[in-house]
Amino acid sequence: MPDIERYGLSRRWSDIVIYSGVAYWVEVAEDPAAEIEGQTAQILAQIDATLVRIRSDRTALLQVLIYLADLADVGRFNKVWDRWIPEGAAPVRACVQVGLPPPYRVEMVITAARTRN
Amino acid sequence: MPDIERYGLSRRWSDIVIYSGVAYWVEVAEDPAAEIEGQTAQILAQIDATLVRIRSDRTALLQVLIYLADLADVGRFNKVWDRWIPEGAAPVRACVQVGLPPPYRVEMVITAARTRN
Amino acid sequence: MPDIERYGLSRRWSDIVIYSGVAYWVEVAEDPAAEIEGQTAQILAQIDATLVRIRSDRTALLQVLIYLADLADVGRFNKVWDRWIPEGAAPVRACVQVGLPPPYRVEMVITAARTRN
């Protein structure tokens, strides 16, 4: 059997899955009543917390798929994003508009490497 | 050359690609005339068949990106999903609304580990 | 620290990230004034250039997520795609409609193996 690690397991999903040194997870804001800046800041803080939990850090992000409920938010999203991304270690990203359940404004699908055993 | 396995090859796509112990594939219902429950059940049965084919099983799902044509279907989708997901081995998942060609209601992008050589 | 390679780094994203023999990147047409055929042809040429840069080639594509601004473009998209995909080595693909910033008609999220060290 392969060594698959799962964190935050529920009946419906795992919060994080790690396999072969690569971690996969999805984030939405814990408090979606916030506006786009607040939801984005929450998600990035949640990513920081997840990275600590899986023994990694911001410099090990590989790919982030960004789903916005409204592309008109992208400028405000980017202001928060740009301050958070570590210089010289940005991930690949795609940013598109999809339908999210209100009041969610943004959702991210993250792939990252583990940095420590 | 890396050892890339491809199954179900056509001019336009492969049904399954496996590289470095990780399998990638995409599913839509073979009979899209069905409602959301029927399409979901078909896709999950198709995933089971694919997992057998690639020498893996439901406990090795890493990530599933779920595309719904209408987020209003999510409750009915989840009822079928929750019954199928193995307890203690759920994948990471994202579930968003996108445009699918009618009458498709749901599409899934699956990443899974191979469990046997 | 894991050996993560990044190319085309900016404050906001990397153009390409490679980890553990797998490359991740995202493409939109450099000249989005073109119609769907032109944007698709540009992206596929850009993928060829990226594959050379990362010491790989078209036969090593694993997965392509295709985002179209309008699913009505899929027939015209496929004509260009089918001519480009190498016979016997097609990737897995999903093709859905999402919101893209105009005048972009198509965006692709690519996963590929590196073929040479």
Image (cartoon, coloured by chain):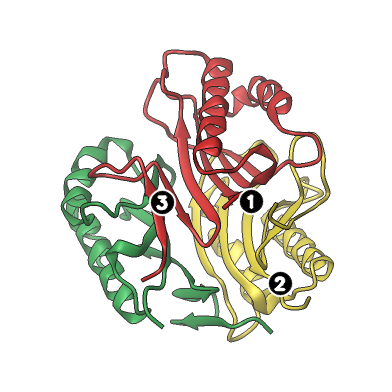
Chain colours: A red, B green, C yellow
Q: Gap between marks 2 and 3, in whole Å?
A: 32 Å
The local crowd at label 2, few if under 14, some if 14 to 19, many if 20 or more residues have their Cα within 10 Å, is many
Residue A61 percent location from the top left of the image: 64, 44
Dot 1: what SS?
A: strand
Disc 2 and disc 3 on one polypeptide chain: no
Return the chain for callout 3.
B
Q: Report which residue position mark 2 lands on.
A: C114
Residue shown at the point (74%, 33%) measured from the top left: A86
Residue B100 is marked as 3
Q: Amino acid at mark 1?
A: Val
Kindly indicate whether the residues beneath marks 3 and 1 are on one polypeptide chain: no
Which residue is painted at 57% across and 21% down in the image? A41
Marks 2 and 1 on same chain: yes
Front disc: 2 or 1: 2
Residue name at image x 57 percent, y 56 percent: C66
Using the image as rendered, state which of residue B28 and residue A64 is in the foreground.
Answer: A64
Say what amino acid the circle numbered 3 marks.
Leu
Image disc number at residue C106: 1
